[in-house]
Amino acid sequence: MRSSRRAAARVAPSSRRNPPSVLAKANRVTSATDYRRLVRSGRRVRGALTLAYGRRTSSDDPLRVGVIVARNVGGAVVRNRVRRRIKAAAWPLTAGISGLDVVVRALPAAAEGSWQAIAGEVEDAVSTLAGRVR
């Protein structure tokens, strides 16, 4: 009887109605070399919660976003929450901007930042870098 209850719980439909807003593989900075290049030689935009680095790429390339959340932001749960918020804030920007690589570094204040504050900073940083980076 117990095993049938467990099996029934596993096959229950998800309560999520909308598909998740995650960055596609083509929209992510994945290699350590790209992260290093962006942080060392990219243009910077600093906010209260984040620091963004950006470099222009070929105009045919999609917007690519990378996220850095160091241990000084908080414990693992807090770091993952901040990382998810930054990625979710960057997702709608991928449709309108191309030819730009961005790495967003979360500052320790991001641990207490609200979703709206983080999303606003990411949007401002990406739009500023898109206009300013050559």
Image: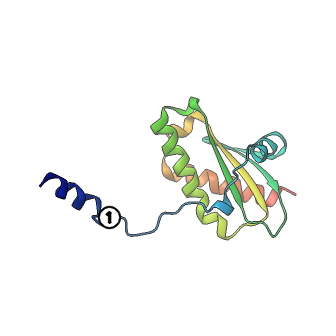
Question: Where 50 falls versus 126 (above or below)?
Answer: above
Crowding near the residue tagged with mark 1, few <14, some 14–19, many ≥20 C-alpha atoms within 10 Å: few
Total tally of numbered discs in the picture: 1
The image quadrant of residue 105 is top right
Q: x%, y% of residue 19?
A: 46, 68
Given residues 83 and 119, the one toward you in this image is 83
Question: Where 74 falls versus 2 (above or below)?
Answer: above
Quadrant where the C terminus lies? bottom right
**Residue at x-position 51% and y-position 53%:** 116
Instruction: State the residue lying farthest toward the left.
Output: 1
**Residue at x-position 79% and y-position 60%:** 131
Give the color scheme: rainbow, by chain, secondary structure or one colour: rainbow
**Residue at x-position 79% and y-position 64%:** 99
Confirm whether residue 117 shows in the render: no
**Residue at x-position 51% and y-position 32%:** 74
Instruction: State the residue lying farthest toward the right.
Output: 134
Q: Amino acid at mark 1?
A: Ser
Residue hosting label 1: 15
The image quadrant of residue 107 is top right
Q: x%, y% of residue 114?
A: 48, 47
The image quadrant of residue 7 is bottom left
Q: Left or right: 43 with respect to 68?
A: right
Q: Secondary structure at mark 1?
A: loop
Q: x%, y% of residue 82?
A: 52, 44
Quadrant where the N terminus lies? bottom left
Q: x%, y% of residue 38?
A: 79, 46
Q: Left or right: 16 with respect to 31?
A: left
Confirm whether residue 88 shows in the render: yes
